Image (tube, helix red, strand yellow):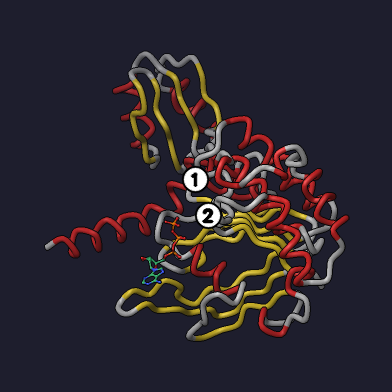
Amino acid sequence: MNDIEVRGLRKRFGAVTAVDGLSFTVPPGQVTGFVGPNGAGKSTTMRIVLGLDAADEGTALIGGRPYRALRAPLCEVGALLDVAAVHPSRRGRDHLLWMAHSHRLPARRVDEVLEQVGLSQAARRRAGGYSLGMRQRLGIAAALLGDPPVLLFDEPVNGLDPEGIRWIRGFLKRLAAEGRAVLVSSHLMSELEDTADHLIVIGRGRVIADTGVAELLAAASGDRVEVRTSDRTRAMTVLADAGATVAATGRDTLTVSKLAAERVTALLGGAGVAFSGVAAHRATLEEAYMELTRDAVEFAAESAGEGEQ
Ligand SMILES: Nc1ncnc2c1ncn2[C@@H]1O[C@H](COP(=O)(O)OP(=O)(O)OP(=O)(O)O)[C@@H](O)[C@H]1O
């Protein structure tokens, strides 16, 4: 099976627990977003999957085998961890030719991936003159060289302009549509909103949520109801008396939990409170994410504070 399987992964760096018992699966045929605040452990996890760091405990398997057991790694997994570190005097195409040669891949394959990432023209220029977007494309071309069924991208849109971001998003989706397992990390949920089918949200080295994007939104939206009323104070009293938790979210808007929309309408109508709208609250993905990771972020802020003393 062409997937990534992480089970009970743990990694400490001195006093810091970077990865604290992570388990998740990245299946083929979809883009899996790997999201968490800075320092949550995303890069460390990806480095362990790719055999660049050793886990203290647990396993990370690619197609059922650890990275070190892969016979032709380039053909089984591709990764973009940092923008391509290529010597500035080296031409993009030569960099890829050298990699292809190490795996006995034909030069034809180099030209294919250059075409795929839209770098054919620039490939004969020296990498020193490449923009960030071009270096990113070169890194992606390198990841694709062996036509691997499993791909990992660590914060691939960092620093790119809107055109570059749009290109990468579309590209990741196409790779998944071809049946590959694609894991892409970001510390911003909004970056993955239009790209990921599934999300693994982590904080403090642990999985906080492993969920479809649609399910996450539904859960975050909860049973909250938004009410628009010119008589906010009375509305709050009436709803709170009926057992709801009510928060004023604007000059004439309230967010109500623990009561269904129909019940809110009936209560306000019965008490003669004027209102112009009652609607189920729909969370944005960013809101859902903030809610999920709030504790992890607070913890990070506290630890940073302790470190400064
Ligand atoms: N080589 C290392 N030595 C010491 N500490 C490390 C090392 N690598 C990572 N860490 C620590 O492990 C924790 C997790 O870091 P990691 O880079 O995996 O997080 P991340 O989720 O990728 O964050 P970001 O979004 O900032 O890239 C952090 O507290 C980090 O400081």
Residue 35's label in the rendered image is 2
| Amino acid at pointer 2 | Val
Of residues 302 and 256, the one drawn nearer to the viewer in this rendering: 302
Question: Which residue has dot 1 on it?
Answer: 188
Q: In the displayed image of the protein, which residue is found farthest to the front?
A: 89
| Disc assigned to residue 247 | none
Would residue 44 appear left or right of 95 to someone viewing this image?
Answer: left
Of the pair 291 and 57, the residue shown nearer to us: 57
Query: Mark 2 to mark 1: distance in Å?
Result: 7 Å
Verify CB contact (< 8 Å) between mark 2 and mark 1: yes
Q: Residues within 10 Å of mark 1 (few under 14, many from 20)?
A: some
What percent of the width, then of the height, locates residue 129?
57, 40
Instruction: Provide residue 243's location: percent of width, then percent of height.
Output: 38, 42
Q: Residue at x 46, y 53 (%)?
A: 292
Mark 1: secondary structure: loop
Q: Is residue 269 left or right of residue 58?
A: left
In what quadrant of the picture does the N terminus appear?
bottom right
Q: Is residue 126 above or below residue 166?
A: below
Q: Amino acid at mark 1?
A: Leu
Instruction: Report whether residue 199 is seen.
Output: no
Upstream in sequence: badge 2 or badge 1: 2
Q: Residue at x 37, y 40 (%)?
A: 245
Q: Quadrant of ligand 1?
A: bottom left
Name the spot of residue 183 as percent of width and height, x first: 65, 58
Residue 55, compared with residue 101, is above or below; it is: below
